[in-house]
Amino acid sequence: MDMNWVERSGVLQACGARNAVPAERARDEVAPSVMSESSSETPLRCSARTRGARRFVRLMLLCASVLLGQQAWAAGCKTMNGYPKVYNLTLPGSSTMIPRDAPVGTTLAVVNGPMLTAGSSSNTATWFAECNTPTGSLNLVLTSTPWPLASPGIYSTNVAGVGVKMVRASVPVPGSVAYTPSSFPGNIGAPYGWYWYANPVFVYTFVKTGPISGGTVTSADIPTMAFNLDGTATVFTSTNSGKITFTAGACVTPDVQVPLDAASVKAFTGVGSTTGAKSFNIAVNSCPPGLTSVSYQLDAASGITVVNASQGVIGLGNSATAKGIGLQIKDNSNNPVSFGSMHATTGYNRTNGGNFTIPLKAFYYQTASTLSAGSVVSQAVFTMSYQ
């Protein structure tokens, strides 16, 4: 494009050209009107005489604001190399055991979307989008939410106590991240190219949100999402398929009856002395494999007084007639089993699950200096915890 000089109010103005034409030739050149595509001003008009005849010429040319080269588009971004795409999240179809007493917030399962191939700033064939500005925002939006929020960032599913959260490269969904020249992961200079790092396109994490009875989460019960640049270029959308089943992991623990043998009050030697040891087992059956730990806790039943919690001593029930007597519980190594505290078990097989027992002992325990013979009746409650 040749240099076009425009004379207006005695000032020579140059617009979007390469080679200068001397000012003294301005009268011999046709001076076209010039207006930017985005300008609302009236085009500049000039006239020139050619051999005594007056001609008016009006041309519309792109001024210096035009983007020179192959790429020219409105401010924003556009996709390339086959984008936008649709990526599918495939639920594994497997069954996942959840420890019944796992705390809220526990990660239950992690499902990755398709793995992306790393691109490079120098290879435009690996770009998924390009922008004409190095600043803007990455936007992750939800396109469907079958169930409401269970807590901030975590959506409920059709299975009570099971929620799901979504991230793309550590950015939560929904979410937005601004980028700047220093953080733009593309080439230097416009257009600015976007390319992937080698990571999953998105990650869905299932978490415990409350008590779980178990059930199957289907693909229709989790959100779908989309990713765009500056709101002008949708890079991908997501779909879901498959299912995942969650089961509440727990063991079966039947009630335990402990028949105590008769003992003489003469066997006691003072407050804190014991006699009449009786071994018994708490049966723990049908345990699922995969639990991290199985623990138990003893508490006095309703109406029973805890005499000494740290020493594992409780009083007698209202129907008992003996006086000055309580019951103490010890483990198989004769260590007191404190009441109100969790105790680890050692018999659980994490690989196979199955059955095991918790071996314990019950003792008569002298609680007062004065003793009276009679019946001894008491009751404790044991609680199992599965992590």
Image (spheres, rainbow, N blue to C red):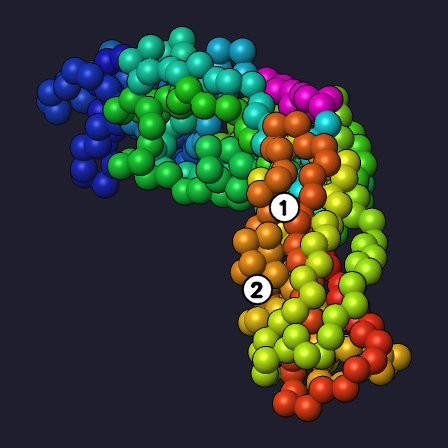
Residue 349, horizontal then vertical, whole percent: 62, 33
**Residue 346 in the figure: left or right of residue 386:** left
x, y percent for residue 216: 79, 33
Residue 248 seen from this side: no
Range of residues picked out in magenta? 84-94
Residue at image x 27%, y 37%? Answer: 182
Residue 122 at x, y percent in the picture: 29, 13
Disc 1 residue type (three-letter): Val
Residue 336, labelled with which disc?
A: 2
Q: Is residue 181 visible?
A: yes
Verify whether residue 86 appears in magenta: yes
Q: Position of residue 155 (x, y in %)?
A: 68, 45
The mark that comes first in sequence, 1 or 2, is 1
Q: To which residue does mark 1 refer? A: 294
Q: Quadrant of the N terminus?
A: top left
Which quadrant holds residue 3? top left
The residue drawn where x is 56% and y is 71% is 310
Is 126 magenta? The answer is no
